Image (cartoon, coloured by chain):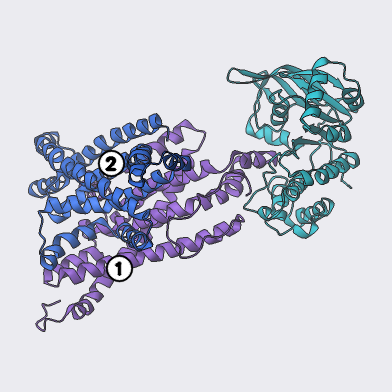
Chain colours: A cyan, B purple, C blue
Amino acid sequence: MEREPVPAPADAAPAAGDWMIRFDQVVKRFGDLTVLDHLDFHVRAKERVTLIGPSGSGKTTILRLLMTLERVTGGLIEVDGRPFSHMPGRGGLVPANEKHLRVARRKIGMVFQQFNLFPNMDVMRNITEAPVRSLGRSREEAETRGAELLEMVGLADKAHEHPARLSGGQQQRVAIARALAMEPEILLLDEVTSALDPELVAGVQCLLRDIAQESQLTILCVTHEMHFARDISDRVLMFDRGRIVEDGPPEQIFGEPREQRTRDFLQAVIEAG
Amino acid sequence: MMLSFTAPGPLGTAAEVLPYLLDGAVVTVKVALGATPVALALAFIAGLAGCSGSRWARGVSRGYLEFFRGTAVIVQMYWIFYAMPALTGYRLDPVFAGVIAVGLNLGAYGSEVVRGAIAAVPVPQREAGIALNFGPVQRMVRIILPQAWVAMLPPLNNLWIELLKATSLVSVISVADVIAESRTLRNTGYSPLVVMTLVLLIYLLLALIITLIMRMLERRAAHRVGREPPPLLPRRRRRRPPVPVRGEVA
Amino acid sequence: MDWDWDYALSIAPEMLTTGLKVTLQATFAGALVAFALGLVLALGLRAPWSGIRGPVRLIIEFVRSTPLVAQLFFVYYVFPSALGISMSALATGIVVLGVHYAAYTAEVYRSGIDSVPKGQWEAAVALNLSRPRTWTSVVLPQAVRRVLPMLGNYLIAIFKETPQLTLITVVDILGLGRQLGSENFRYLEPITIAGLFFLLVAIPASLVVRRLEHRLGT
């Protein structure tokens, strides 16, 4: 996939080797339930990380925090060397307001389990509306880019189709194109094939693998498909109860896991088929 | 208008009174058309305020709703027309007072429809809007409202008919609508059976026109969000599956 | 002209007595008709024979599409001459209110009946209950329980519609207020008192209905 380099903001400090995403003692609670418990982890730029672990272990919450769909209860998230969940104010850091979030979100795109295409817009409009409204692109510019992206996901002929008339796999391809149209630096994939019929899964996974390999994106992926995890990532984080149990390359995690929890989990996944 | 000495049959009477009733019907339609934008604007303002994050806005919206749902249009009309002048020293034009009273009242009911329809748009749609970095206003205008609109139309159809029915009370503040005309004709000696049958038929016809207009809007809206458009002349409010606003795309 | 407390206090007792007597009488009697007739219409909508379903649907649509005032005038002025049926103004008001709102409560019952799970019907068949027995001891008790809050809302709606009965010469709280207003050339106080009366009954009543909704978990 050809992709124009995203121009770095003037005040962007971090050089190579710095962290793209940094979680610093992040706590997330929903009422009495602690989902993330003083979590620390870093992701380097262009790293492709898969989060695995049992349901409720906090993987999806990490993606939702990065997409600002949830707010942290405690701790700090930094993206590209700058505070993300917070902003400077009152002599320290205060929780970010909508204005700060809109700037911060600029770097991040997300593909959802349920696609979440907008039913009130056709396919092309789904892809171009955000670049036009939020990046200030012209309609023509956005549509040219939209056509390229549709071509890439194999749906060039569906530009003016209605989302509801597409199969699940096609909808998810549109959702991927829509996320990429915003030219993110970080792409979040939240169980993107779980809602698809089995025969459509492989095609979407294949597409994402190609995108992962050919782009400069930093990818955070939550999935229950271990093949896909192995294919797409160069690092795997095993989660349990809001903490990282094991952190390593896919060969290690899937080949010779060090932790009992990881072994148990992988065993359970294999048995479940 | 004179008592007829030829004592025509019901059809003859109908032909005699119809022009007067149609004059009244025109006034009824005028009041209804005047009140509709007032009600619609108030419904959207109060409905949006009702789902806003601000406690204050929600409170005002709730107060408006409870106040106007708590009293009947006829009382509000009397108050605006007869009681308010004692406070303001200024009597409103009757048609204007009718438009305001009906608009305020139906706007309150409408705000519940708007609020409910917005709340029924699935949360993931909002989240997809955040993920694509739309601002709060853009999310509402470009994503939430167009989808909520589809769910709003069937209840708005009913409310629009209720609005038409509410205008039937403007004769109490001396507006010469179809009800006022019917009273004059009755008092002049025309057969109440003929006069009132015609009045009922006129309202029926107007309600039918409203339903047809709303049906066309519903079809367009359903088409826009990719759903099977409902048939144009079905049995209203029946045999229609509940609007499936759940799940992003069917 | 300002609010005159002496005047307001002098007319308030008479107005409230009338309000409680006439308005509440019309409300409860009208609601009784509406709730009973609505159930009959709802059963008509579920009748196995389309020769019943069709006309019932038409009647409901007709009643819902025309204003209460027109219906009040029709029954009050047409029935005596055309059908030889004459009722007092209040009785007319009660019947018309009842029929008008029966068209609304019929839909309410219908939704309640539709919401009884299919398994309940099947269980009734499995227990070999007769059809009428299934209705009276299985379906309707559950359906009515589910729709109680909605019926409560319609009770409030009927209450608020009663002032329209003044248009067929019933002297209710609003009618009396109007009379007092024209006698004294002061409408502000009587009309405001009437409005407050409705507000002060309707708002707490709707809070009670909402509590009920909560309790029944609908």
Three-letter amino acid code of the residue under disc 2: Ile
Secondary structure, mark 1, is: helix
Q: Give the left or right position of residue C210, taking residue B168 as reference.
A: right
Rendered view: B13 above or below A43: below
Up-down relation of residue B109 to residue B187 (above or below):
above
Q: Is residue C46 left or right of residue B168?
A: right
| Residue A24 percent location from the top left of the image | 75, 18
How many dots with numbers? 2
Q: Which residue is mark 1?
A: B202
Q: Which residue occupies the foreground of this view, A259 or A71?
A: A259
Q: Is residue A72 above or below residue C137?
A: above
Residue B56, x across and y down, in percent? 45, 32
Residue C61 seen anywhere in this rendered image of the structure: yes
Badge 1: how crowded within 10 Å, few (<14), some, or many (20+)? some
**Horizontal relation, residue B27 to residue A135: left or right:** left
B178 relative position to A80: left or right = left
Determine contact: label 1, label 2, CB under 8 Å: no
Q: Residue A163: x, y in percent?
A: 68, 53
Disc number placed over residue A269 in the picture, else none: none
Q: Which residue is located at x 31 percent, y 68 percent?
A: B26
Q: What residue is shown with label 2?
A: C156
Location of residue A261 in the rendering, given as x and y in whole percent from the top left corner: 79, 17
Give how far apart the Cα atoms at labels 1 and 2 are. Answer: 28 Å
